[in-house]
Structure formats: structure tokens, C-alpha cells
Amino acid sequence: MLRLILSIVLLLLSASHPSLASSLAAGEPLTEAIARELLGEALQDRQGGGRFRVMVERPHLPLANRSAADTELAVEALHHDRHSGRFQAVLVGRIDGQTRFRLPVHGRAQSLVALPVLGRPLAPGEIVSERDLQWITVRSGRLQPESLTDPEQLLGAEARKRLLPGRVLTARDLGPPLLVRHGRPVRLIYLQPGLQLTTLGTAQDDGALGDAVRVVNADSRQQLQGTASGPDEVTVGTVGGDWPAGH
């Protein structure tokens, strides 16, 4: 009788689901790679996709196969605890439709997540483009609630600090592009109904589009509160205070 075993990744499989089957050639040993592939496919079938890391603890692989005929392998009675990652299952071997063995297996199954990361270092202020991205696969348990997993969350964002390639990014690493930077000259636009005035000023804060920023009028030295409205541009309205006299 062929004694086989698997190292696998399983995730909520129900015994009511049909099992996936594969075949082992006559005399071919059951290796960890074969077992992982078989159970990885079974898990993907039950979960509608995804990738998984397989770890079989009992029994140990590889196992010899002394059968002179091809053996059909099927995974049955799979159960997985999503919280702990522990699983148990039964590997069934059949030759010519006849059951030859039922081998209990157990271990740990970890779901994997594919997500975008940087493929090169980024300096503070650099904008992430599509050519900067590459994909990695990590265990879902490693992700934090603030981890960025969608490329749309990265593309067009600005590095808030020096970022290294290959690491999972969070919302603290990136942000909207800064249009106004502290200490740099800006164009001040003052708006009132039917009136628009323009002068120069110096930004006292960093600001992305729509952010509130403080600005010092270059002529009067008065500090105003405005809104970042474009590159090196701040719009000031009546909420930010009266326009300095003479402007």
C-alpha cells in the first residue's frame, strides 16, 4: 500500500465540497512539492482564488511509492481554523477506482497576499510612478490595518521620507503631492465676489491641494490663513482675515 503524505495549505474547506484529485505515477515518491501543489489547487478551488503557504507537520515527506500502477490522489475532510492557521485533512489514494489508503495529515496553512512595493529607493518629495512598482507576496498576517495593498494607493503619491525598495508601505510613508512648501515663495490670490487680487508671499506650512496653510504677505509682513490651490499658490478669502491695506 502506498503511504503518502502532504505538506499543504488549506483554508476553510468543507467536506461537502467535491475533492480535487491528482495522480502520482507508478513508483514516483510523494514529495513536498507535489503535495503543496495538490492542496494549493484544492484551496484555491474552494476559496475562488488566492495563494497559500503550505506547511505539513505530520507525516514527514517525502514518502516512497512502491505501487506498480498510477495512484490517484484526492484531498478530503479538510478543515482549517482561519484564526490559528491549523488544519487537518485526509489524503485518499485510489488505484483503478479502488481505495488503497486514507492518510491523515495536519499542519499549518497561511494565506498569502500579493501587493505592490517600490522597486527602487525614493527620496522625500519624489512621486511614485508605475515604473517604480514591483509585486511581492507576503503572509496576510504580516499586514497592518494601514498597509497599502492597492497600486492606486501608491501611484501619484509623494514620498514623505526616504523609502526603501521591497518593503510594505503604509499611509505614513506616502501622501498627496505637496503643492506648497514651508519657506518657499508663493503667489497669493485673494478672492471676493467680483474681485481678485494677486501678490506675493512666503509659505509658513507645507500643504497639498486643499490643505490650510499660513502665508506671510511679502509687502505688509502680515500673516494670513489660506488654502493651497495650485503649485506654489495659495488662495485667501475673507475667512482668512482682511486683505492687507494697500493690496
Image (cartoon, rainbow, N blue to C red):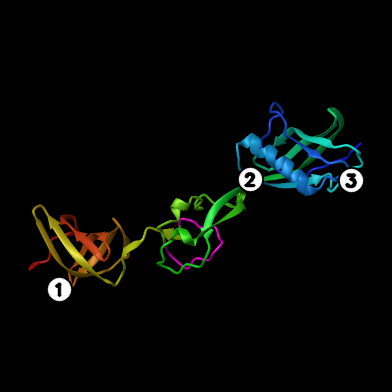
Q: Is residue 165 magenta?
A: yes
- In the image, what residue occupies the spot 56% across and 60% down? 167
Instruction: Name the one closer to the observer, 200 or 29.
Output: 29
Badge 3 marks a residue whose secondary structure is loop
Question: Mark 2 or 1 closer to N-term?
Answer: 2
> Which corner quadrant of the image does residue 50 belong to?
top right
Identify residue for label 1. 219
Chief SS of the magenta region: loop
Crowding near the residue tagged with mark 3, few <14, some 14–19, many ≥20 C-alpha atoms within 10 Å: some
Checking the image for residue 101, the label placed there is: none
- In the image, what residue occupies the spot 81% across and 48% down? 31
Give residue 16's position: percent from left, percent from top: 70, 26
Question: Is residue 7 in sight in this rendering?
Answer: no
Q: Is residue 40 above or below residue 153?
A: above
State how far apart marks 2 and 1 are (Cα).
62 Å
Residue type pointed to by label 1: Asp
What's the magenta region?
Answer: 159-171
